[in-house]
Amino acid sequence: MNENKQKTTRRKFLKNSTAAAVSVSLGLTPLIRSARGANEKIRVGFIGVGNRGTQLLNGFLKQDDIEVAALCDVYEPYLARDYSKVDKKIKDSLGGRVPKMTEKLNRNVTRYKDFRRLLDRKDIDAVVVATPDHWHAVQTIMACQAGKDVYVEKPLSITILEGRKMVEAAKRYNRVIQVGLHRRSSKSYMQIADKLQAGKIGKVTVARAYRVSNMYPNGIGQFPDTAPPKGLDWDMWLGPRPKRPYKNNISLYKFRWLQLYSSQMANWGVHYCDAMRWMLSEQAPVSISAHGGRFALNDDRTIPDTMEVIFEMPSGSLLIFGQYEANGGPALIDGEVEFRGTLGNLYAGTSGETGYKIAPTRAGQFQDSGSDIKPFAGDKIDGDLTAQHIRNFLDCMKTRKQTNCDMETGHRSTTFAHLANISMATKSRIEWDPKKERAINNRSANNLLHYKYRKPWTL
């Protein structure tokens, strides 16, 4: 690890600040720790141990070279790892999304309600950020400032400016970052990328992916404002977002259908957009056009139940993603991602665990014959991708090499999701300057690159 050079004002600030007072600044010198011994365990703190946080906690516990040092959550039953204390309304609403929390932890694992107390620990080497999406930027940047390496769940951010500031922080403080786009650790997808980039199916003109989940007829339901459940620090849960009453279909999981906190484009779409742009070695679109709306579901969501977005790429191809929540699957007979080339088509599943298939194209109008490539089925070679992604992160912490999905990679992929949402919100086609990360001649779109944080939180 790196040696301690961080200014003492940072630590003094963290000790003296209250739970509501923080400023995310990029002006501090990084903490750098002394090198870790070959057999020394990596001490990890977990910020957010709900549904996905529990999955990651269990994934890290399977690794022999880590020690769980601390947990942090704003909901006391999650922090105490006590399923019996979870509010019945939350259980009824979320069902299997409420973790059973049966893992065995050492007694010396410290518990915190305020993530800043965890970051103040000099003996913690890395943190896992699995909080609601609107918290990712603040907590990840502060972790970088505190000299921690970070495994941050997708989506990396909820605005494009947040993502860029996170990239800057990772570089400035020389941190190892793994963004939770775990398909990046898929051996099957690595094979697909090699084949497509080598021209196996010719020039790919269209890549298409779908996320299908039929939520008809109830969606996320309709609920009145009410008092938060016992043990939930609702104000801290809201963090930089506007103050508002608690609602049972916002926290603890269904915030992903409310634009203030996330979106399904960011929650699921980012996985597919990341896979498509990686396979084709693309960095950013030059134009974005999104279409859709609430066509069938009458629930409390503030995002579409049906959405399609077209990304035009500079190399001369289209990346198309569809998010369908008012009808069921399957999306494609042979998977959920397809690549259409001049010589053939490639079909893949969502994780690589189902392998992939290559099919030759048939001759079209005025052509004598079709493609001479032979059908091919890739092996089903992937196991637990989350475990492989965690292993890659821990190995890179030791070598200080770049992870499979570093901050810049995660930011570029997450930007696809944000641009889709901005196109929907502005009802316009966006022409995009990827270097400046600004829309060209579209002031309405540029106004949505970030939002004003609720005081005292700042970016």
Image (cartoon, helix red, strand yellow):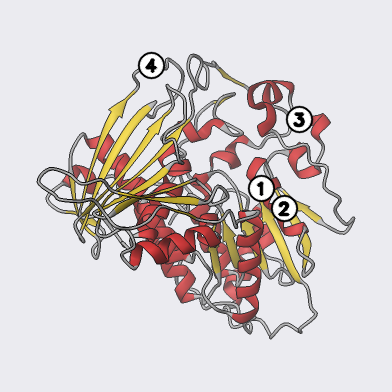
Which residue is disc 3 drawn over? 86
Amino acid at the residue labelled 4? Ala
Amino acid at the residue labelled 1? Gly
Which residue is disc 1 drawn over? 53
Residue 126 occupies quadrant: bottom right
Does residue 258 appear left or right of residue 367 in this picture?
right
In front: mark 2 or mark 3? 2
Provide residue 305's location: percent of width, then percent of height: 39, 26
* Residue drawn at 26 percent across, 54 percent down: 371
How far is disc 4 from disc 3 in space, using C-alphas? 32 Å
- Asked whether residue 366 is in view, the answer is yes
Question: Between 343 and 99, which is closer to the camera in this rendering?
Answer: 343
Q: Which mark is residue 57?
A: 2
Marks 2 and 3 close (CB-CB < 8 Å): no
In front: mark 4 or mark 1? 4
Q: Earlier in the sequence, mark 4 or mark 1?
A: 1
Provide residue 59's location: percent of width, then percent of height: 71, 55
Q: Is residue 434 above or below residue 247?
A: below
Amino acid at the residue labelled 2? Leu
Residue 231 occupies quadrant: top right
How far is disc 1 from disc 2 in space, using C-alphas? 6 Å
Does residue 212 appear left or right of residue 99 in this picture?
left
Q: Secondary structure at mark 2?
A: helix
Q: Which mark is residue 296?
A: 4
